[in-house]
Amino acid sequence: MTHARIPVAILGATGAVGQTFIRLLAGHPWFRVAEVAASERSVGKSYAAATRWIEGPLPAEVALLDVQPCDPATLTSPVVFSALDSAAAGDLEPAFARAGRFVLSNAKNFRMEADVPLVIPEVNAAHLSLLGTQRAARGWNGAIVTNANCAATMATMAMAPLHERFGVRTVFAATMQAVSGAGYPGVPSLDILGNVIPYIGDEEPKIESEPGKIFGKLAGNRVEVLDIAVVTLFPEFFRATLETSIPGRAAAKGLVRYRVVDLRATKPEIRSAVEQLFSVKVLDVHTLRMSRKTRRVGKTMGYKPQWKKAIVRLAEGQRIEFFEGV
């Protein structure tokens, strides 16, 4: 027995993100694109006439649809995929939720709201349980669920198994936006380096804040946001789990070497971090501030960042295993 697919509407359907929604939903087993909506200049035209289609074939069943205004009084689909720009999403997405629609948003506006799930299904699908709280607090029957920033999504997917096993505290990331990310028709050629844009305003704050919410644990009707931005320390990973300049003697004494990123970290803070992260008992901590090493970049001579080394002594019989059995 086959079930009818759920009709969905696409807001901001003529833009690059809206076109991606349509492309991904083409032939979907659960959903069918029943309505497309965009700005006033496109309303009343067929989707094919209103859109400068960018990639692949335009699905025939969508091409013939008339473009509607982004108005919950006009659109009837129970599920709405929002590709709206943030300037419009702040008002329109809540309007659809108040009208009882389930809004799946690509916009940034509500990502960090306490009662709005910021979801990567493979990582934190359980956060969808916040929707009951959201509906009660906002007095609507609909819902808003958001996805994460594109770079934050990829970084979080890679970090998730590491965070589950070890606990992520510090992340060093460098991102560059593909030219296509600026939408059509793109950006001025002088802003492009190769095929990337080296800097995009507002990108770094999203990468700093969003993974913390995604990794956060549900506590009743809220998510306890993990603070990843606070730099404490990270272990150097070696084949041998216990490693110092004198491996044999060090292993016998239960010593583990750490590179401490934040020079302000105190011995009690280092002890607490290691005990909480690895569930061990730390007897004492010794630290040594390492001298800076020179570094050449082109013709310019500079220095690598200064760092501090910590030697942590564990209670007798305890050890830290970064990988099970290793």
Image: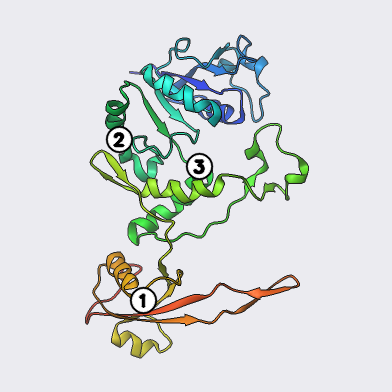
Q: Quadrant of the C terminus?
A: bottom left
Q: Residues within 10 Å of mark 2 (few under 14, many from 20)?
A: many
Provide residue 225's location: percent of width, then percent of height.
Answer: 35, 48
Compute the Cα span from label 2 to label 1: 40 Å
Residue 117, labelled with which disc? none
Provide residue 305's location: percent of width, then percent of height.
Answer: 56, 72
- Amino acid carrying mark 2 in the image: Leu
Q: Residues within 10 Å of mark 3 (few under 14, many from 20)?
A: some
Residue found at x 51% / y 48%: 205
Residue 241, labelled with which disc? 1
Q: Which mark is in front, 2 or 1? A: 2
Examine the rendered structure and indicate whether residue 204 appears above or below residue 170.
Answer: above
Whichever of labels 2 and 3 marks the residue nearer the N terminus, that label is 2
Q: Which mark is in front, 3 or 1? A: 3
Residue found at x 45% / y 24%: 93
Provide residue 84's location: percent of width, then percent of height.
Answer: 54, 27
> Which residue is identified by label 3?
149
Whichever of labels 3 and 1 marks the residue nearer the N terminus, that label is 3
Q: Residues within 10 Å of mark 1 (few under 14, many from 20)?
A: some
